[in-house]
Image: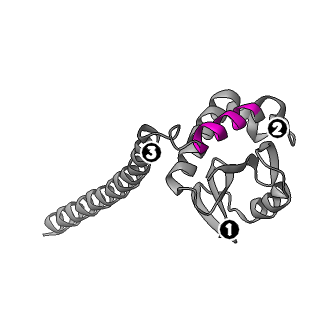
Amino acid sequence: MAILFAVVARGSTVLAKHACFSGNFLEVTEQILAKIPSENNRLTYSHGSYLFHYICHERIVYLCITDDEFERSRAFGFLNEVKKRFQTTYGSRAQTALPYAMNSEFSSTLAAQMKHHSDPKGSDRVTETQMHVDDLKGIMVRNIDKTSHCSNRQTREKHSSNCWISVCVFIL
């Protein structure tokens, strides 16, 4: 059970990649990258005995290929760590970078993280817990936004109701 291949891309433009094993990973990945929507998302695709896990954040896709026995939580722990390191290192430069512009520097980071997260002992509970906290944080932000939107609408309705009462009183 291991992470076989990892890539960071902007749309279908590969910025950095690393493979632990030989195979046609890049060709398959290019087909998958073309189908990933650009909105923020995380998902796992299954094909044969392989799983394709990805996180899309601010149009940057962090994708890894694992065998079908690899735990999903470990794969997303790996992708979250790669995302954090990539954003810290490159920031907004990734939005305009040329193909493979970050490969010479970042492929070694991918390799080290792939090795660390492929080892069952290396993928610890802290990483898994952090992933769950991030998920809950996203849900809470969405719920707060919805509550705020409803509260604003209720305030406007109350205000318009008060105006209508004032108009009725003025007419009488």
The residue at 62%/32% (across/down) is 85
Q: Position of residue 131 (x, y in %)?
A: 46, 46
The tag earlier along the polypeptide, 1 or 3, is: 1
Residue 141 against residue 36 in the figure, above or below: above
Q: Nearer the viewer, mark 2 or mark 3?
A: 3
Q: Is residue 78 visible?
A: yes
The mark found on residue 49 in the picture is: 1
Q: Secondary structure at mark 2?
A: loop
Quarter location, residue 26: bottom right
Front-lying residue, 76 or 114: 114
Whether residues under marks 1 and 3 lie with C-beta atoms below 8 angstroms apart, the answer is: no
Asked whether, in this view, residue 12 is left or right of residue 170, the answer is right
**Magenta-drawn segment:** 108-118
Q: Nearer the viewer, mark 2 or mark 1?
A: 1
Q: Position of residue 121 (x, y in %)?
A: 50, 39
The residue at 66%/41% (across/down) is 114
Give the residue number, with chain letter if any, for mark 2.
97
The tag earlier along the polypeptide, 2 or 3, is: 2
The residue at 39%/45% (across/down) is 133
